[in-house]
Image: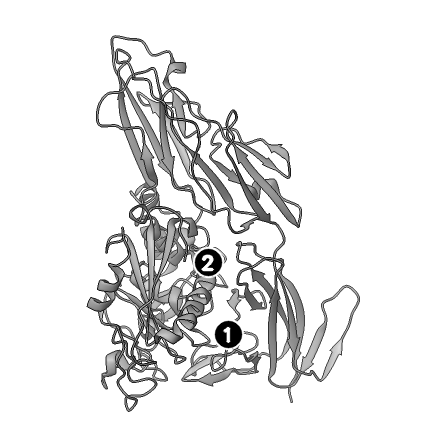
């Protein structure tokens, strides 16, 4: 489904379906595509998409559907992975717990060459429209529920990142009560006050006071670990509490480390097993995050070399004296702003060093390696206007082939690390552009389509009491009760588009239709709508569970909406006003 490099050098997302018959395999493919388009709209998956290969393992089942769906009285079906709701038809479990036979899942994942337990994450999709999923060694989700594409990143948060639920209940509709244990091991739960976090430099103290990616401000919000009180989390809501919101910064930092730990920042390098001569070029091939370039620092006997982050050093230019040896190192670091913990930054997931001993007395044999491209950003789909595009080359011993970039036929300066080009730094005009990379003196050339125009979205509301137009102001719609909003996205390029909205500047929320029907519009109401003991669509201050404050927020509210297209472009937010008056 997506290939970014050899399986043994990538993080491999292996998706398989259960309860899809041979005739239903097109439905499985469509479900996988929908889940992926949502996953790539969520950070940090959006920025680290280039670390991930995606494999779909088609496993036809004899019968359609999965066990105990939707209730314990539903039949047990003959399927390939034995997936089932109620924790595998266990009356003591809960309906939404969707489990899979781990042994069978592993055996099918083993069909993917180059993958292993160490470099993959299994996601099992059930052929079901019932809400459900689970996280553990493997992640599961229902394939066809309106919310199912949002279940997948939540469950990967469990399985890959070790994140915990921030729910304040276990059984739906039943408040979880008071937390009674000691300081949680979970990085995003605590008993500490904000002052104690700062004084002890503990938990999420580095993020306190920041505007949360999931809305509001990162601080201390009560509830989590299935308890309503006595334990606190960083944000009012986030991916691990309410599906539809983003990972907040605390969770995102964990996920960056978890994804990066599945790969090696240094993909290849000049062999380092024995001393090398000073008459050659030394090189390092790195990974290439879509969201930003990796940094590379060269040092000779501990002193930094002025290379501008170049991926190769010509030792002949250093004037090394014979009669002694030198220590050469190359340190690759991910400078992502998603990480603030120095320990995480210095971990093997985000920092790697390669060392060589250079002996000028040694001579390097000649080689005949031609200069050519060796790896690059995929050219078969448009790249986004803020993406990092890369082009790696072969490695002749006596030189490092230069990569020259051009946009719409005009040369683009890219000193230092010429293997990566950060399109975001070019501030491209809206429209479609042609990006090329070539190696001087060769016939090789790569070409990409750059999509610099974000998708657009339009809204359709149910009939208001009245519509108010004021010069220079967004349109205002007046209601005295519930109303619906449908968002429709359009793009001039192929690929799925994800729509998002937010109310009064709160966190961006993925538009999925309505929990009971993906084709229905989203419904706002003064106190929210209770569905399966969760609350959706309260206008104003959000409400997640029935015991949250249901007081209607009368008055005027700002609703913003935007899109994330298949190339990763985030559209400009547009808005309208809604005034809720008492009936």
- Count of labels in the image: 2
Q: Is residue 223 left or right of residue 537?
A: left
In percent of width and height, residue 339 lies at 40, 48
- Dots 2 and 1: beta carbons under 8 Å? no
Q: Measuring 32% from the left and 41% from the top, which residue is drawn there?
A: 346
In percent of width and height, residue 198 lies at 37, 52
User: Quarter of the image containing the C terminus?
Assistant: bottom right
For disc 1, the marked residue is: 542
Q: Nearer the viewer, mark 2 or mark 1?
A: 2
Q: Measuring 45% from the left and 84% from the top, which residue is drawn there?
A: 531
Q: Is residue 580 left or right of residue 70?
A: right
Residue 91 vertical position relative to residue 195 in the rendered view, above or below? below
Q: Is tag 2's residue or tag 1's residue first in the polypeptide sequence?
A: 2
Q: Is residue 342 left or right of residue 441?
A: left
Q: Measuring 70% from the left and 77% from the top, which residue is drawn there?
A: 477
Residue 39, quarter of the rendered image: bottom left
In percent of width and height, residue 96 lies at 33, 79
For the residue pair 10 and 208, the one nearer the viewer reads as: 10
Crowding at label 2, few (<14), some or many (≥20) Cα neighbours within 10 Å?
Answer: many
Residue 134 vertical position relative to residue 454 in the rendered view, above or below? below
Q: Is residue 189 visible?
A: no
- Name the element at disc 2: loop
Residue 545, quarter of the rendered image: bottom left
Q: Is residue 458 left or right of residue 387?
A: right
- Gap between marks 2 and 1, in whole Å? 25 Å
Q: Measuring 22% from the left and 63% from the top, which residue is drawn there?
A: 107
For the residue pair 274 and 474, the one nearer the viewer reads as: 274
**Which residue is most to the right?**
471
For disc 2, the marked residue is: 40
Residue 111, quarter of the rendered image: bottom left
């Amino acid at each position: 489904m997506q290939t970014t490099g050899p399986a043994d050098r990538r993080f491999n997302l292996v998706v398989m379906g259960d309860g899809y018959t041979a005739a239903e395999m097109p439905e499985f493919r469509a479900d996988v595509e929908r889940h992926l388009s949502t996953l790539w709209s969520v950070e940090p998956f959006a920025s680290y998409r280039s670390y991930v290969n995606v494999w779909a393992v088609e496993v036809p089942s004899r019968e359609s559907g999965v066990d105990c769906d939707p209730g314990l009285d539903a039949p047990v079906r003959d399927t390939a992975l034995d997936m089932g709701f109620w924790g595998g038809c266990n009356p003591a479990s809960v309906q939404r717990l969707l489990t899979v036979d781990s042994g069978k899942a592993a055996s099918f994942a083993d069909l993917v060459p180059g993958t292993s337990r160490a470099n993959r994450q299994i996601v099992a999709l059930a052929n079901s429209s019932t809400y459900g999923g689970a996280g553990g060694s493997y992640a599961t989700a229902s394939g066809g529920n309106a919310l199912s594409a949002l279940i997948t990143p939540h469950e990967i948060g469990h399985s890959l990142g070790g994140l915990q639920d921030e729910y304040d209940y276990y059984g739906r509709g039943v408040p979880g009560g008071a937390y009674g244990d000691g300081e949680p091991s979970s990085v995003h739960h605590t008993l500490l006050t904000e002052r104690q976090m700062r004084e002890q430099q503990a938990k999420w103290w580095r993020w306190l006071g920041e505007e949360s990616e999931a809305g509001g401000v990162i601080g201390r919000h009560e509830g989590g670990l299935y308890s309503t009180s006595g334990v606190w989390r960083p944000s009012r809501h986030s991916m691990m509490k309410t599906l539809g919101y983003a990972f907040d910064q605390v969770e995102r930092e964990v996920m960056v480390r978890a994804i990066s730990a599945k790969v090696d920042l240094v993909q290849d390098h000049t062999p380092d097993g024995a001393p090398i001569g000073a008459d050659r070029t030394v090189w390092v091939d790195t990974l290439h995050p879509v969201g930003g370039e990796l940094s590379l620092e060269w040092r000779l006997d501990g002193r930094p070399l002025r290379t501008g982050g170049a991926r190769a050093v010509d030792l002949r230019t250093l004037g090394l004296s014979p009669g002694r040896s030198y220590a050469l190192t190359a340190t690759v670091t991910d400078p992502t702003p998603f990480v603030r913990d120095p320990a995480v930054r210095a971990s093997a997931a985000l920092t790697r060093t390669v060392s060589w001993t250079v002996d000028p007395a040694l001579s390097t044999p000649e080689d005949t390696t031609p200069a050519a491209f060796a790896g690059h950003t995929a050219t078969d789909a448009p790249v986004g206007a803020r993406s990092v595009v890369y082009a790696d080359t072969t490695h002749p011993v006596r030189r490092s082939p230069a990569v020259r970039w051009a946009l719409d036929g005009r040369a683009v300066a890219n000193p230092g690390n010429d293997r990566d080009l950060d399109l975001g730094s070019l501030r491209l005009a809206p429209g479609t552009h042609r990006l090329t990379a070539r190696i001087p003196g060769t016939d090789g050339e790569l070409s990409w389509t750059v999509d610099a125009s974000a998708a657009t979205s339009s809204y359709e509301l149910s009939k208001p009491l009245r519509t108010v137009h004021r010069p220079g102001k967004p349109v205002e719609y007046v209601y005295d009760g519930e109303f619906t909003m449908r968002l429709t996205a359009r793009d001039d390029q192929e690929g799925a588009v994800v729509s998002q909205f937010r109310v009064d500047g709160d966190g961006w929320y993925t538009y999925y239709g309505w929990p009971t029907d993906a084709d229905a519009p989203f419904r706002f109401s003064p106190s929210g709508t209770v569905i399966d003991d969760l609350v959706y669509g309260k206008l104003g201050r959000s409400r997640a569970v029935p015991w949250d404050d249901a007081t209607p927020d009368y008055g005027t509210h700002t609703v913003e909406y935007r899109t994330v297209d298949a190339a990763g472009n985030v559209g400009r937010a547009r808005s309208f006003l809604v005034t809720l008056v008492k009936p």
